[in-house]
Amino acid sequence: MSDLQPVHISLARVRTNDQFILDPNGPLVTKWDNARVMVDKDYIWDPSFGGTGAADADGNPVLPWPITTTASNFQGIPAGTQYPAGTQLAVILRQLLTPLQTPSYTAPTLSISANATSGEIGSTANITITPNWQQNDAGAVALYSIFNNGINIWSNLTVAARVLTAHQFGATQQSITAQVSHIAGVIKNDSNNQPFPAGSIPAGVRTSNAVTLTSFRNTFFETYNSVQANPTTSAGVRALAGRTNTTTTRQFLVSIPVGTRTIVIAIPKDQGILIEAVNMAMPGLPITAAFVPSAAAVNVEGANGYAAAPYDVYRASFDANTTIATQYRFTIG
């Protein structure tokens, strides 16, 4: 049988020892016995044939020669697939009948949040930067870092919350970001149990969103049950009992208790001037003219003695103490 040559199996019955083992009209048989296989009296496989052999140790039919596919219209086998000699025919058949399923990869994500993002200028706070790291199909974390305005202020081998202890809110806006350096992710296999690297996650760096820390200067106010003069010093303004952030909210309410005689308001000059005061009990009758600004601005420090900025101080003194409790709405513009 040294001159045995493989032939193409057409839609013909394949016989061995008078038993059909491949019949286009019948079930597929993948277990061949140790017998010659004939088609129309021509041998197509003989177990005594030398070389790589046509069956493995269990008698499963295998390729006696290597094959590289050249067509791309196979359902489960892309063009260029290589099959070495000795590949089980059942493996190739299964791949032909099963469309190739390729894996997908999901990139990692990183975001951060903070328990506080603003404060009076000069004030301090313990700010916790909390990360949300989703590794997905990336590799393990190699290094986690936090940056303030692009400067590395902390690094760790694992992703974890970090407290910025006694952080001071200054005049400069601060941008907090985080980065994760990670190794390459695992390569997944396709449905043919072959590595599928396309779209896999390489080693790299992921950068979070930015958390912006901003400062503001308070607007101060207080009510008195007697006639009071305007405060003229930083300490006098900061001693006013009420305070609010009017940097973005241009209106605020002040409760006016029974017996009020004087109201004092101090507004940072860079935020604007008092343009309206309204007694909410009589909203149609503004009382803006009753609030007279001081002749000169007062330089008022921020918290903890932070650098001073000019304020306009407004005061309204009534002829008599109020007899009803109400609210005044003030608008800065």
Image (cartoon, rainbow, N blue to C red):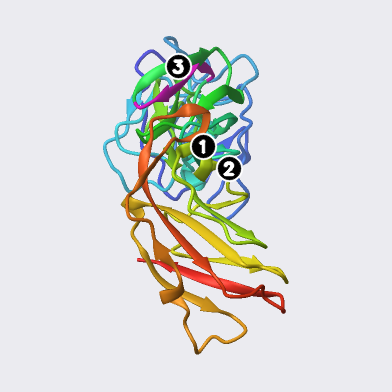
The answer to which quarter of the image holds residue 203 is top left
Q: Give the amino acid type for the residue marked by disc 3 in the picture.
A: Ile
Q: Are marks 1 and 2 in contact (CB under 8 Å)?
A: yes
What residue is pinned by disc 1? Answer: 235
State how far apart marks 2 and 3 are (Cα). Answer: 36 Å
Q: What residue is shown at x 54% (from left), y 85% (from top)?
A: 283
Task: Give yes or no for residue 110 being in the magenta stretch.
Answer: no
Residue 106 seen in the current view: no
Percent from the top left, x then y, of residue 284? 50, 89
Q: Sort mark 2 into few (<14), some (14-19) or many (20+) by Cα contacts within 10 Å.
A: some
Tell me the residue that label 3 is attached to.
Answer: 153
Q: Which residue is mark 2?
A: 239
Spot occupied by residue 322 in the image (x, y as percentages of width and height):
67, 75
| Foreground tag (2 vs 3) | 2
Is 100 above or below relative to 149?
below
Whole-percent x, y for residue 329 in the image: 53, 72
User: Which one is in front, 131 or 68?
Assistant: 131
Secondary structure of the residue carrying tag 1 is helix
Along the viewing direction, whichever of 29 and 217 lies nearer the viewer = 217
User: Which quadrant does the C terminus fall into?
Assistant: bottom left
Give how far apart the Cα atoms at labels 1 and 2 are: 6 Å
Would you say residue 322 is visible in this rendering? yes
| SS state under label 3 | strand
Alpha-carbon distance for marks 1 and 3?
35 Å
Magenta stretch bounds: 140-149
The x and y percentages for residue 120 are 50, 40
Find numbered disc 2 in the image and state the secondary structure of the residue it sits on.
loop
